[in-house]
Amino acid sequence: ALERTFAMIKPDAVKAGNIGHILTMIEKERFKIIYLQMLKLTEKSVRLFYAEHVEKPFFPSLLEFTLSGKVVAMVLEKENAIEDFRKLMGATDPKKAAKGTIRHTYGTEMPANAIHGSDSRESAKREITIFFGEFAAIPSSEKR
Ligand code: CMP
């Protein structure tokens, strides 16, 4: 089905000048960019966005990293967008990500893995809603 997913280019990739390269990889795979915003997150918004990781041992480093610069948040639409985007990103750890994936190409070392993508339909809806509102989570095909 036509789906929407949430993606976020992280501060490491923004600082390295890889926004354009990453958007090119995304568009080459026929994802349609529906919304896009460049912004600096706040501690409060990182705690909300990464709520499931707040108690994990790596959270302090994830928080510091996510606050270290601007991010590019976006809503992407495509058939099977959520699963297909996870394939395009590659494994969470850039050192384990397959060749040709965004994280293998532009990530370095955790938590600096260049990009985030929703891991399920529920996460996609939650994450899109945080950044762009509830209406933004509904695919074009259901808006007619
Ligand atoms: P992301 O897909 O955005 O989801 C949570 C993020 O936490 C993940 O990408 C990494 O940036 C970071 N992360 C996950 N596991 C670890 C870890 N073991 N050590 C450091 N950072 C991690």
Image (tube, rainbow, N blue to C red):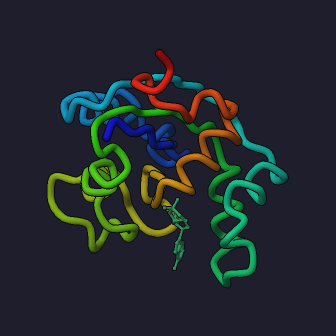
| Residue found at the far top of this picture | 144
Q: Name the quadrant of the N terminus.
A: top left
Vertical arrangement, residue 66 with respect to residue 27, above or below: below
Answer with the quarter of the image where residue 31 lies.
top left
Q: Position of residue 7 (x, y in %)?
A: 47, 43
Looking at the image, which residue is at 53% across and 49% down?
124
Answer with the quarter of the image where residue 113 lies.
bottom left
Q: Position of residue 32 (x, y in %)?
A: 34, 25
| Residue found at the far right of this picture | 44
Number of numbered tags placed on the structure image:
0
Which residue occupies the foreground of this view, 1 or 123?
Answer: 1
Vertical arrangement, residue 138 with respect to residue 11, above or below: above
Looking at the image, which residue is at 63% across and 78% down?
58
Which residue occupies the foreground of this view, 46 or 80?
Answer: 80
Q: Is residue 128 left or right of residue 108?
A: right
Vertical arrangement, residue 105 with respect to residue 59, above or below: above
Q: Is residue 101 left or right of residue 43?
A: left
Looking at the image, which residue is at 80% across and 45% down?
42
Q: Is residue 82 left or right of residue 49?
A: left
Which residue occupies the foreground of this view, 74 or 123?
Answer: 123
Answer with the quarter of the image where residue 57 lies.
bottom right
Q: Position of residue 69 (x, y in %)?
A: 64, 42
Q: Is residue 49 left or right of residue 7?
A: right
Q: Position of residue 86 (x, y in %)?
A: 33, 56
